[in-house]
């Protein structure tokens, strides 16, 4: 706990992409072991309509596959290696499926529900406009299956949906009105600078460079009664700045570093 009781939530961005291969189950479980409050993941659709946790549109950077995620079936993606590209993949040890297997949203939800821990899951829908309403529809259906569309404070797992697209937030609002949402912003869309968020979003998610260049942004968001989760905060200067602003959530590739820093305050 920092001075005067302030302590932001710490979210492992893509599972804590600095230490281990991003969006792998092993990375997410490590982040929880390290004490992260929550996990951030991106979801996108496969050709046969499954939601998988992959950030990039193409497979090239984070797997041994090539081409678009949306052009592959789940079975095709399941045959790929999503781990050994990473500089810290443990090459000398036995193969580690938890650090190289494709992560689906189902697998991630099952793992966090089975973990017995308090976990706040931030799920970002990628490119909702390209696929019509299908990403959000599949997401809501999946969350309903796990009983996670209604906030329940006594339940260990809480889900919040995030998007850069206001359209996606509107679809979530229509299909699951009680589900909290984050409006992600990189540049400053009209209204957000005065703390106005679209379609019932309760949380603003500005990039850290935007917060740095607009010192009035976080105060405006808070004055409007909203919270702020800032991404992607990976170094001490940025962390000190967002802590100075008393942000509600810090989304980071380096959860251990952020947690260690908070422990010294
Ligand atoms: O948490 C928001 C952040 O993840 C948005 O950027 O490109 O890493 O998905 P990106
Ligand atoms: Ca993301």
Image (cartoon, helix red, strand yellow):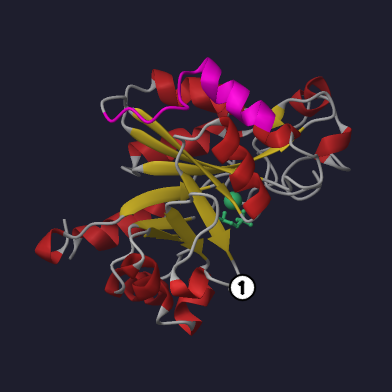
Position of 132 relative to 1 (above/below): above
Q: How many marks?
A: 1
Q: Quadrant of the C terminus?
A: bottom left
Ligand 1, by image quadrant, is: bottom right
Q: Residue 109 colored magenta?
A: no
Magenta part of the chain: 137-153
Percent across and percent down for residue 146 are 49, 18
In the image shown, does 86 or 205 lie closer to the viewer? Answer: 205
Res 103 visible: no
Among the 4 quarters of the image, the one containing residue 170: top right
Res 177 visible: yes
What residue does disc 1 label? 187
* 258 to the left or right of 50: left
In the image shown, does 123 or 203 lie closer to the viewer? Answer: 203
Q: Quadrant of the N terminus?
A: bottom left
Percent across and percent down for residue 115 are 38, 23
Percent across and percent down for residue 201 are 48, 51
* 79 to the left or right of 36: right
Does mark 1's beta carbon lie closer than 8 Å to ligand 1?
Answer: no
Percent across and percent down for residue 43 are 65, 39
Position of 115 relative to 257 (above/below): above
SS class, disc 1:
loop
């Amino acid at each position: 706990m920092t001075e005067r009781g302030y302590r932001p939530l710490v979210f492992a961005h893509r599972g804590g992409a600095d230490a281990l291969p991003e969006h792998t189950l092993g990375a997410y479980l490590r982040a929880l072991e390290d004490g992260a409050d929550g996990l951030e993941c991106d979801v996108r659709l496969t050709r046969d309509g499954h939601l998988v946790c992959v950030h990039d549109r193409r497979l090239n950077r984070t797997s041994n596959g090539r081409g678009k995620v949306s052009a592959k079936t789940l079975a095709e993606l399941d045959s790929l290696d999503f781990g050994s590209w990473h500089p810290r993949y443990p090459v000398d040890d036995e193969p580690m499926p938890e650090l190289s297997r494709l992560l689906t949203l189902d697998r991630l939800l099952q793992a966090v529900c089975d973990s017995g821990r308090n976990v706040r899951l931030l799920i970002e829908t990628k490119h909702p406009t390209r696929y019509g309403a299908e990403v959000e529809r599949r997401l809501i259906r999946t969350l309903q299956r796990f009983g996670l569309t209604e906030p329940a404070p006594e339940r260990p797992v809480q889900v919040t949906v995030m998007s850069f697209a206001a359209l996606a937030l509107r679809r979530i609002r229509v299909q699951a009105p009680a589900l909290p949402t984050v409006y992600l912003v990189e540049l400053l869309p009209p209204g957000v600078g005065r703390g106005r968020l679209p379609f019932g979003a309760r949380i603003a998610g500005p990039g850290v460079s935007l917060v740095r260049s607009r010192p009035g942004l976080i105060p405006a968001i808070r004055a409007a009664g909203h919270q702020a989760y800032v991404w992607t905060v990976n170094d001490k200067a940025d962390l000190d700045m967002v802590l100075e602003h008393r942000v509600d959530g810090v989304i980071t590739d380096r959860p251990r570093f952020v947690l260690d820093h908070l422990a010294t305050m």
